[in-house]
Image (cartoon, rainbow, N blue to C red):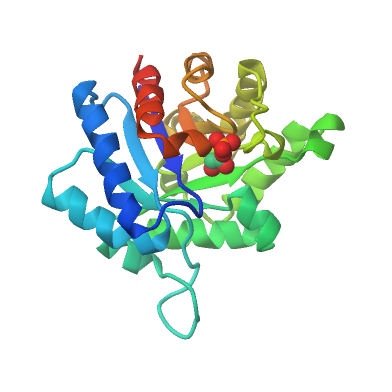
């Protein structure tokens, strides 16, 4: 069974709700012009929470092809959790995807694998696909412990999810040393770890789940390197940071991911 490529643009803490409207309009216009087929390669933007209502109204009102998600979700039910956003609230806004355990949240907000697994579980319960992020920092890579490190993160971050839930999730390999640095992992580096992730999923839940789960690469992805990354058998798409803030560049990345 072929896996549909996924190109997700993580806006991080950039672009307010006013600017979001024109960014989404420009991206959608570029995709329409390029005759992009969402069934051939799904293109998703991940704006800040405060943008989501504007994006929803725009996408629904003008019947745009761009899909959207969020960058984080609470692991908890609605209630006394000041500042958190429940998965159900995101689902009501038409959110299809949510990143959980991005390295910036693991680093700055001390999120561990158990928290990431709980957030993934909350997203899935609300019908939202989690994009579960894993990846090693430079010290681990220099010690050549990156595969075991990432596999351990996969174990912890998928803990408690059923086979079907894992099959319906996305796992994003983002080496921390390649994020926002311009330092892209080679296609062979990306394949090595994405393959190890898929093998781990096979070991945990069997061949069928391993065949279905989508594994992305993220870290300084651009139109100049995405094609080679996408040629790797275990790379099913990209989680794009900086380059997704330029709608023409992001549309180029999406076009190259299709082939
Ligand atoms: P850059 O593409 O800017 O390196 O960011 C990658 C990333 O963190 C996406 O989630």
Placement of the N terminus among the 4 image quadrants: top left
- Residue depicted at x 43% and y 75%: 77
- Residue depicted at x 54% and y 62%: 118
Residue 256 vs 203, above or below: the answer is above
Q: Is residue 60 left or right of residue 96?
A: left
Q: Position of residue 250 (x, y in %)?
A: 39, 30
Viewer-side residue, 195 vs 252: 252
Q: Residue furthest bottom?
A: 80
Q: Is residue 94 visible?
A: no
Q: Position of residue 111 (x, y in %)?
A: 65, 61
Q: How many marks?
A: 0
Quadrant field for ligand 1: top right
Viewer-side residue, 135 vs 8: 8
Residue 118 vs 20, above or below: the answer is below
Q: Is residue 183 left or right of residue 4?
A: right
Q: Position of residue 11 (x, y in %)?
A: 46, 47
Viewer-side residue, 14 vs 74: 14
Residue 3 vs 70, above or below: the answer is above
Q: Which image quarter: residue 184? A: top right
- Residue depicted at x 26% and y 64%: 92
Q: Which image quarter: residue 201? A: top right
- Residue depicted at x 50% and y 67%: 75
Viewer-side residue, 152 vs 9: 9
Residue 74 vs 154, above or below: the answer is below
Placement of the C terminus among the 4 image quadrants: top left
């Amino acid at each position: 069974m072929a896996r549909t490529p996924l190109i997700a643009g993580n806006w991080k803490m950039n672009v307010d709700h006013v600017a979001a409207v024109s960014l989404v309009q420009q991206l959608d216009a570029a995709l329409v012009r390029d005759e992009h087929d969402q069934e051939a390669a799904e293109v998703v933007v991940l704006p800040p929470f405060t943008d989501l209502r504007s994006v929803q109204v725009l996408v629904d009102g003008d019947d745009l092809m761009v899909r959207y998600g969020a960058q984080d979700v609470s692991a908890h039910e609605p209630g006394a959790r000041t500042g958190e956003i429940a998965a159900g609230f995101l689902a009501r806004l038409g959110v299809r995807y949510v990143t959980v355990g991005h390295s910036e949240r693991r680093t700055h907000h001390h999120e561990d694998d158990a928290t990431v697994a709980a957030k993934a579980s909350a997203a899935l319960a609300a019908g939202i696909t989690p994009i579960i992020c894993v990846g090693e920092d430079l010290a681990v890579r220099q010690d050549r412990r990156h595969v075991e490190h990432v596999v351990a993160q996969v174990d912890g971050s998928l803990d408690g999810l059923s086979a079907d839930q894992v099959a319906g999730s996305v796992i994003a390999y983002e080496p921390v040393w390649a994020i926002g640095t311009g330092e892209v992992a080679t296609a062979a580096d990306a394949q090595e770890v994405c393959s190890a992730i898929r093998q781990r999923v096979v070991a945990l839940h069997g061949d069928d789940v391993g065949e279905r789960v989508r594994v992305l690469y993220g870290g300084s992805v651009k139109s100049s390197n995405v094609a080679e990354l996408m040629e790797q058998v275990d790379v099913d798409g990209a989680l794009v940071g900086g380059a997704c803030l330029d709608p023409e560049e992001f549309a180029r990345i999406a076009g190259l991911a299709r082939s």
